[in-house]
Image (tube, rainbow, N blue to C red):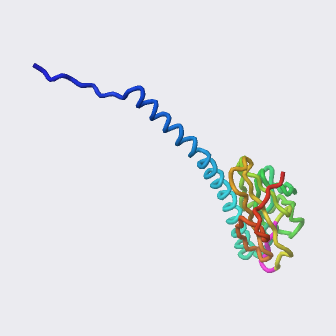
Amino acid sequence: MTAPHHCSAYSLFELLMTLAIAAIVLTIGLPSFARLVADHRLRVESDALFHAVHLARKESIARRRVVTLCSSLDGQNCAGDKDWSSGWILFVNQGRSNETVRDPNEELLTYHPVAVEARLTANRLAFSLRSTDLRATNGTLIICDRGEQATARALIISYTGRPRVSLYQASGQAWKCAD
Protein backbone atom coordinates (compact mmCIF):
# COMPACT_ATOMS: atom_id res chain seq x y z
CA MET A 1 0.00 0.00 0.00
CA THR A 2 1.30 3.46 -0.83
CA ALA A 3 1.27 6.47 1.42
CA PRO A 4 -1.28 9.17 0.58
CA HIS A 5 0.13 11.95 -1.60
CA HIS A 6 -0.33 15.48 -0.25
CA CYS A 7 -0.33 18.43 -2.62
CA SER A 8 0.87 21.69 -1.20
CA ALA A 9 -0.53 24.84 -2.73
CA TYR A 10 -1.43 28.40 -1.87
CA SER A 11 -4.94 29.37 -1.15
CA LEU A 12 -6.64 32.19 -3.02
CA PHE A 13 -6.58 34.28 0.16
CA GLU A 14 -2.78 33.87 0.52
CA LEU A 15 -2.23 34.80 -3.12
CA LEU A 16 -4.40 37.94 -2.83
CA MET A 17 -2.63 39.03 0.35
CA THR A 18 0.79 38.56 -1.29
CA LEU A 19 -0.30 40.62 -4.31
CA ALA A 20 -1.72 43.34 -2.05
CA ILE A 21 1.52 43.60 -0.06
CA ALA A 22 3.55 43.69 -3.29
CA ALA A 23 1.33 46.47 -4.66
CA ILE A 24 1.77 48.52 -1.49
CA VAL A 25 5.55 48.10 -1.54
CA LEU A 26 5.72 49.08 -5.23
CA THR A 27 3.46 52.09 -4.68
CA ILE A 28 5.74 53.37 -1.94
CA GLY A 29 9.01 52.41 -3.63
CA LEU A 30 8.56 53.44 -7.27
CA PRO A 31 8.47 57.23 -6.74
CA SER A 32 11.67 56.96 -4.70
CA PHE A 33 13.25 54.86 -7.42
CA ALA A 34 12.25 57.38 -10.11
CA ARG A 35 13.84 60.16 -8.04
CA LEU A 36 17.00 58.06 -7.67
CA VAL A 37 17.20 57.47 -11.44
CA ALA A 38 16.62 61.17 -12.20
CA ASP A 39 19.29 62.20 -9.68
CA HIS A 40 21.74 59.76 -11.23
CA ARG A 41 20.98 61.18 -14.70
CA LEU A 42 21.81 64.70 -13.51
CA ARG A 43 24.96 63.46 -11.84
CA VAL A 44 26.08 61.89 -15.13
CA GLU A 45 25.54 65.19 -16.97
CA SER A 46 27.31 67.28 -14.33
CA ASP A 47 30.23 64.81 -14.19
CA ALA A 48 30.62 64.93 -17.98
CA LEU A 49 30.80 68.73 -17.91
CA PHE A 50 33.10 68.69 -14.88
CA HIS A 51 35.56 66.39 -16.65
CA ALA A 52 35.30 68.40 -19.88
CA VAL A 53 36.37 71.56 -18.03
CA HIS A 54 39.33 69.70 -16.53
CA LEU A 55 40.24 68.37 -19.98
CA ALA A 56 39.98 71.90 -21.39
CA ARG A 57 42.30 73.24 -18.68
CA LYS A 58 44.80 70.46 -19.29
CA GLU A 59 44.72 70.79 -23.07
CA SER A 60 45.02 74.59 -22.98
CA ILE A 61 48.16 74.29 -20.86
CA ALA A 62 49.68 71.41 -22.86
CA ARG A 63 48.96 72.97 -26.27
CA ARG A 64 49.38 76.60 -25.18
CA ARG A 65 46.15 77.35 -27.00
CA VAL A 66 42.66 78.49 -26.12
CA VAL A 67 40.24 75.58 -25.61
CA THR A 68 36.54 76.37 -25.89
CA LEU A 69 33.49 74.61 -24.48
CA CYS A 70 30.19 75.60 -26.11
CA SER A 71 26.67 74.35 -26.77
CA SER A 72 26.15 72.42 -30.01
CA LEU A 73 23.19 71.16 -31.98
CA ASP A 74 25.13 69.03 -34.48
CA GLY A 75 28.25 67.96 -32.58
CA GLN A 76 30.51 69.92 -34.92
CA ASN A 77 29.77 73.62 -34.45
CA CYS A 78 28.79 75.95 -31.62
CA ALA A 79 25.11 76.76 -31.42
CA GLY A 80 25.67 80.24 -30.00
CA ASP A 81 22.86 79.67 -27.50
CA LYS A 82 22.63 79.64 -23.71
CA ASP A 83 20.47 76.51 -23.86
CA TRP A 84 22.93 73.59 -23.82
CA SER A 85 20.24 70.87 -23.72
CA SER A 86 21.07 69.46 -27.16
CA GLY A 87 24.69 68.83 -26.28
CA TRP A 88 28.09 70.50 -26.20
CA ILE A 89 31.50 70.36 -27.84
CA LEU A 90 35.04 71.02 -26.72
CA PHE A 91 37.53 72.25 -29.33
CA VAL A 92 40.94 73.87 -29.69
CA ASN A 93 40.41 77.50 -30.67
CA GLN A 94 43.57 78.02 -32.72
CA GLY A 95 43.21 81.65 -33.66
CA ARG A 96 41.58 82.91 -30.45
CA SER A 97 38.77 84.01 -32.71
CA ASN A 98 35.16 84.39 -31.70
CA GLU A 99 34.63 81.76 -29.01
CA THR A 100 31.25 80.70 -30.38
CA VAL A 101 32.60 79.82 -33.85
CA ARG A 102 34.55 76.65 -34.61
CA ASP A 103 36.63 77.01 -37.78
CA PRO A 104 37.01 73.92 -40.04
CA ASN A 105 40.72 73.55 -39.18
CA GLU A 106 40.16 73.61 -35.40
CA GLU A 107 40.42 70.22 -33.71
CA LEU A 108 37.31 68.84 -32.04
CA LEU A 109 38.32 67.26 -28.73
CA THR A 110 34.96 65.87 -27.65
CA TYR A 111 31.22 65.99 -28.24
CA HIS A 112 28.63 65.09 -25.62
CA PRO A 113 24.92 64.75 -26.43
CA VAL A 114 22.80 65.56 -23.39
CA ALA A 115 20.13 63.09 -22.24
CA VAL A 116 16.65 64.17 -23.37
CA GLU A 117 15.41 64.08 -19.77
CA ALA A 118 17.97 66.69 -18.71
CA ARG A 119 18.00 70.41 -19.36
CA LEU A 120 21.16 72.53 -19.29
CA THR A 121 21.23 76.31 -19.32
CA ALA A 122 24.25 78.56 -19.00
CA ASN A 123 24.88 82.21 -18.30
CA ARG A 124 27.42 82.23 -21.15
CA LEU A 125 27.39 81.23 -24.81
CA ALA A 126 30.78 79.52 -24.37
CA PHE A 127 33.61 79.03 -21.91
CA SER A 128 37.15 79.56 -23.18
CA LEU A 129 40.05 78.35 -21.09
CA ARG A 130 43.47 79.83 -21.67
CA SER A 131 46.82 78.53 -20.49
CA THR A 132 48.02 81.88 -19.17
CA ASP A 133 45.14 84.37 -19.18
CA LEU A 134 42.36 84.36 -16.62
CA ARG A 135 38.69 84.60 -17.46
CA ALA A 136 36.90 87.76 -16.37
CA THR A 137 34.10 86.30 -14.23
CA ASN A 138 32.62 83.05 -13.03
CA GLY A 139 30.32 81.09 -15.30
CA THR A 140 27.44 78.84 -14.31
CA LEU A 141 25.70 75.91 -16.00
CA ILE A 142 22.42 74.85 -14.35
CA ILE A 143 21.49 71.19 -14.81
CA CYS A 144 17.83 70.30 -14.34
CA ASP A 145 15.55 67.29 -14.67
CA ARG A 146 12.71 67.95 -17.13
CA GLY A 147 10.41 65.71 -15.06
CA GLU A 148 11.27 67.70 -11.91
CA GLN A 149 12.05 64.48 -10.02
CA ALA A 150 15.59 65.48 -8.97
CA THR A 151 17.09 68.55 -7.34
CA ALA A 152 18.72 70.92 -9.80
CA ARG A 153 22.46 71.44 -9.53
CA ALA A 154 24.94 73.86 -11.01
CA LEU A 155 28.44 73.54 -12.37
CA ILE A 156 30.25 76.73 -11.46
CA ILE A 157 33.45 77.52 -13.35
CA SER A 158 35.75 79.96 -11.57
CA TYR A 159 37.69 82.70 -13.35
CA THR A 160 40.75 80.39 -13.24
CA GLY A 161 38.78 77.62 -14.96
CA ARG A 162 38.29 75.45 -11.90
CA PRO A 163 34.89 73.70 -11.83
CA ARG A 164 32.78 72.79 -8.83
CA VAL A 165 29.29 71.34 -8.47
CA SER A 166 26.80 73.02 -6.15
CA LEU A 167 23.25 72.19 -5.10
CA TYR A 168 22.69 75.66 -3.61
CA GLN A 169 23.24 79.25 -4.63
CA ALA A 170 25.41 81.56 -2.54
CA SER A 171 22.23 82.78 -0.83
CA GLY A 172 21.51 79.24 0.38
CA GLN A 173 18.52 78.75 -1.92
CA ALA A 174 18.23 75.77 -4.26
CA TRP A 175 18.94 76.36 -7.94
CA LYS A 176 15.86 77.13 -10.04
CA CYS A 177 15.40 75.80 -13.54
CA ALA A 178 14.50 78.20 -16.31
CA ASP A 179 11.11 77.62 -17.88
Residue 88: x and y in percent read: 76, 57
In the image, farthest residue toward the left: 1
Which is more toward the observer, 50 or 12? 12
Q: Residue at 83% of width from left, 75% of height from top?
A: 135
Q: Is 62 situated above or below 120?
A: below
> Disc count in the image?
0
Residue 34: x and y in percent read: 62, 47
Q: Residue at 80% of width from left, 76% of height from top?
A: 159
Residue 107 position by quadrant: bottom right
Q: Residue at 78% of width from left, 74% of height from top?
A: 158
Q: Residue at 69% of width from left, 61% of height from top?
A: 46
Residue 165 position by quadrant: bottom right
Residue 144: x and y in percent read: 74, 55
Does the magenta run of residues contain 28?
Answer: no
Residue 123: x and y in percent read: 85, 63
Q: Is 72 situated above or below 9?
A: below
Residue 13 position by quadrant: top left
In the image, farthest residue toward the bottom: 132
Q: Could you tell me which quadrant the N terminus lies in?
A: top left
Q: The magenta stretch spans which residues?
A: 127-132
Which is more toward the observer, 109 or 122? 122
In the image, farthest residue toward the right: 98
